Image (cartoon, grey):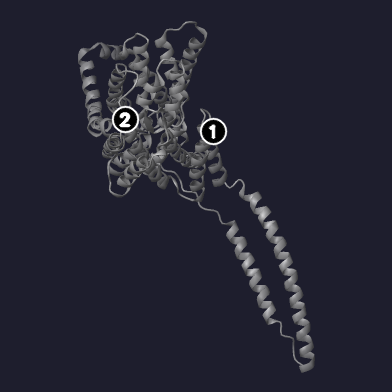
Amino acid sequence: MGIKLRRLLDPEGWSTAWEDWSSKIGPRFWNVVRENWYLGFTSFGGPPVHFKIFRDKFVTKLGWIDEQVYQELFSVCQAFSGPGSTKMHYCINLIHDGFLPAFLGFLIWSLPGALGMFGLAIGVSNIGESLPRIVYALLSGLNAATVGIIALAAVQLAQKAITDKLTRLLVFLGAAAGLLYNALWYFPLLMLIAGIIAVVFDFRWLHGPVKWVVGKCKRKKTEERDVELVERQQEEERAASVKSSENGGAPETSTSRQRVSTVQQSQEQQGEGQLQEPEEEERVVPVSHRLPLTWKSGLALIALFLASFVAIMITRGVVPNNPLLYRLFSNMYLAGTIIFGGGPVVIPLLREYVVAENWVSPRDFLIGLALIQGFPGPNFNFAVYLGALTAINGGYSGVLGAVLGYVGIFFPGLVTVHGTMGVWQAIRSWRWVKSSLRGVNAAAVGLIYTAVYRLWQIGWIDEGFTHGTSLANDPWWVVVTATSYVGGCWFGVSPPVACLMGAVLGLVRYGVVVQGQGL
C-alpha cells in the first residue's frame, strides 16, 4: 500500500502514466477524427441514408466491423429508444476505439447540423407571419428530393435484410402495419412481434403441430388412394386369373407389385426428407468486434439512467410552476427516452411536446421540418431548433434552449445503448437472440417505408397550406421525387447533390407556374 501511495504522489509517476495513456489513446482520437470529420457535413437524407453510408464506409471500406455485426447493431439501435443512426455511429466507434473517442465522434457527427439548426432558429425567430412563395417552393423541392433519397435507402436496406421468405414477409408486414397506424407504443410492439415470429419459425415450435395436421390430411388422402389401388389390383388379379385359367398360365401381377413398391419407396423418401433439420451455424464473434464492458456494468448504467428519468419525471409532474426551461428539458428527455424508430418518429412526437404546449407556432415547426431534411447529420437536431425557438419566445437565451434541447434529446439514447452494448456482449451468441434480431431487423427496415409515406403526405408547403399537403397533388413534385430516386439508384448521384437538385427544381416550378401564370 505504501509503495502504491508513493507512486501516486510521485510527479514523475503521474508523468509516466500520462505518457502511457496518451500514447494509447492519442492514435484512437486521431483515427476517429480522420475517418469521421466530414460525416457531419455530408450525411444528408436522414437515418435510412445514414445507415447505408455507415455500411459502405465502416463495413465495406474500412472493415471496422463485419456484415453480421452491422446487422446486429442495426437491429439493436432500431429496437431501443433514441436516435437510431446516431447510436449506430456511436457504437461502431465505441467498438473500434473506445468510449472517449466514440464520444468525440458523436460530437463531430452531430454538432455541424446542430449549429445549423440553431442558426435557422435565430433566423426564423426574426421573420414575419408569412414567407415569400419562392421560399415555400424551395422547401417543397427539398422535401420531394428527400422522399426519393429515403425511398432508395429503404429499398437497398431491404435487399440486405431479406434473406428468406420469412424476412421478406416481415419487411412487407412491417411497412404495411406502419402505414395503417401510428402511436408511441406501436412501432416497438411491431418489432417485438416480428422478433417473436422469427424465433418461433427458426426453432420450429409450430412445425410439429403443423406437420401433424398436414400429415393427418395426407394420410387420409393416401388411405383413400390405397383403397382405390387395392380395389384396382384385385380387379386386375381376378381378370388375370380368369385369363390364366383359360390359357392354363400363371397370373401376371408383377406390374401391380412394382407399383406398390414404388409407392412405398416414395413414402419412405418423403418421411426421411421430413426428418432432416438444417444445421445451425455457430456464431463466432471476432475479438476486434467485442466491447470491453461487462453485462453487470451495462445493467448498472441502464439502472442509473432509469433512476434519473424517474426523478426528472416526478419533479416535472409534482413540483408546481416549473420554469419554462426545465419543462423544455424534461419534455426533450422524455421524448429521447420513449421514441422508438429514430428520426422519422421524432418529428410528430416533438410536435405534441412543443407545438401543443404553445411554445412554437405550427408554421415555424413546419419550416424546421422541411429544412431538417436538407441538413446533414441526425434528425434529432430538430430538438436544437425547437429548444432555441422555445427559449427565445419565452424571453430566455436561445443558446441555453438549444443546449438543453441537444442534451435532453441525445443523452437518453446514448446512455441506454452504451449499457445495452454491455449486456449485448453476453447474449449476442445465443441462438434465440440471433433469431429474434433477424425478425426485428426485417420489421425495422419495413418501418422505414413509413417515413417515406409520412413525409410524402406533408411535403408540399405553400401559402394556402402552410401545414403541408401531399406531394401527389402536383405531378411536378412526383417528378422531383422520381428524379432523386433514379439519380441515386442508376447514376450514383449522392444525397447532397440530390437535395440540391430538388431545391433547384422547386425554384424552377416557382418561376414557371407561379410567376409565369401569375398565380
Whether residue 378 is visible here, answered yes or no, is no
Mark 1 neighbour class, 10 Å CA radius: few under 14, some 14 to 19, many 20 or more? few
Near-viewer residue (375 or 282): 375
Residue annotated with mark 2: 377
Query: Of helix, strand and loop, which one carries label 2?
Result: loop
Q: Residue at x 45, y 7 (%)?
A: 322
Q: CA distance from mark 1 to mark 2?
A: 27 Å
Query: Of helix, strand and loop, which one carries label 1?
Result: helix
Near-viewer residue (306 or 49): 49
Count of residue discs: 2
Q: Residue at x 41, y 10 (%)?
A: 324
Whether residue 34 is visible here, answered yes or no, is yes
Q: Quadrant of the C terminus?
A: top left
Q: Position of residue 183 (x, y in %)?
A: 52, 29
Q: Residue at x 67, y 80 (%)?
A: 255
User: Is 36 located above or below residue 308 in the figure?
Assistant: below
User: Is 408 located above or below residue 340 in the figure?
Assistant: above
**Please, what is the three-letter code of the amino acid marked with disc 1?**
Leu
Q: Residue at x 53, y 43 (%)?
A: 198
**Please, what is the three-letter code of the amino acid marked with disc 2?**
Gly
Left or right of 169: which side holds 106?
Answer: left
State which tag comes first along the sequence, 1 or 2: 1
Q: Which mark is residue 55?
A: none
Mark 2 neighbour class, 10 Å CA radius: few under 14, some 14 to 19, many 20 or more? many
Left or right of 382: which side holds 20?
Answer: left
Near-viewer residue (52 or 74): 52
Choose top left, top right, bottom left or bottom right for residue 305.
top left
Q: Quadrant of the N terminus?
A: top left
Residue lying furthest bottom = 247
Residue annotated with mark 1: 189
Q: Position of residue 333 (x, y in %)?
A: 43, 19
Residue lying furthest front = 518
